[in-house]
Amino acid sequence: MALLEISNLSVVFGGLKALCDFDLSLEQGELVGLIGPNGAGKTTTFNIVTGVYRPAAGGVRLGGRSIAGLNPYQINHRGIARTFQNIRLFAGMSVLDNVLVGFNQSLRHGFVGTVLRTPRHQREDKRNQDRAMELLAKLGLDDRAMETAHNLPYGDQRRLEIARALATNPKILLLDEPAAGMNPQEKIELAAMIEMIRTQFRVGIWLIEHDMKLVMSICQRITVLDHGQTIAVGTPDQVRADPRVCEAYLGEPT
């Protein structure tokens, strides 16, 4: 049984079928890509899996348990974290505090402990501070921990968003166009970081990306969407050679 199993997933917006009978499986430690032209339904798929939208039909199972229809925070507690096309950091907070927010779902002390700063609260707070700094160090941001998030360069803001997602201790990490707006050198560093996360954190990674060079270089399997329909599934070489993929991107048969 795959860690994440999606079967016959569909969603309808005002009579328009934005996603139709979508299937995907993802194992622990696997890196899978999701590509397609603009408007193909890629982010819609992420939004269904993470509880932003409810599916019209189909199922989503994580570790054999259905998560379809759960709220986003419930799905995050079950083990799925994500980043977004448009960076959604707490811009006025420090880099460190942004990561600490990710640990909130696992806090064990309550409101009273927080107000009174009980020994248990202080121990847990120190433990999370240490864990956050370790996470920032792995992503190359520990030297900027006290800076305000909106002062970071664009590439580092992307890294911070990934660090915050990892702080929730996910089994599956969804990355929605993480290379958007990056320069070539930042994309090379991003590819290395994604591979590091896959191997060191042992998470399954599901990646939406328009940069084909990045996708083809790091993904083990790729699914291609066009107008909500799956038109190709396979290795990078198989997808690259598929005439339906060329047609979807170029607008004419090859």
Image: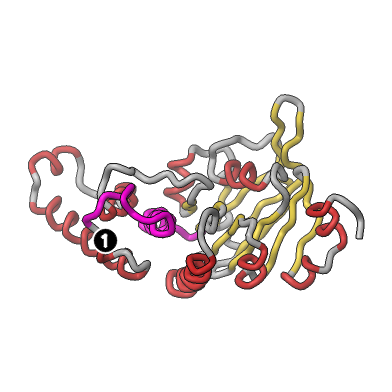
Q: Amino acid at mark 1?
A: Arg
**In which quadrant of the rendered view does residue 21 lie?**
top right
Looking at the rendered image, the quarter that the N terminus falls into is bottom right
Badge 1: residue crowd in 10 Å (few <14, some 14–19, many ≥20): some
Element type at marker 1?
A: helix
Instruction: Please give the name of the residue rendered at 9% of the width and 46% of the height, measured from the top-left corner.
Output: 117
Rendered image quadrant of residue 232: bottom right
Please say whether residue 150 is one of the residues in the magenta stretch: yes
Q: Position of residue 42 (x, y in %)?
A: 66, 48
Task: Choose between 26 and 133: the one closer to the eye.
Answer: 133
Residues 4 and 233: in front is 233
With 123 as the anchor, is 26 left or right in this view? right
From the viewer's perspective, tell me whether residue 91 is left or right of residue 182.
Answer: left
Residue at 57% of width from left, 37% of height from top?
A: 69
- Which residue lies under the disc numbered 1? 144
Above or below for 10 versus 148: above
Residue 236 seen by the camera: yes
Residue projecting furthest to the top: 14
Query: x, y percentage for residue 163?
Result: 38, 59
Observer-nearest of 96 and 37: 37
- Let me know if residue 202 appears in the view: no
Residue 184 picture quarter = bottom right
Left or right of 78? Residue 236 is right
Give the residues in magenta. Answer: 146-172
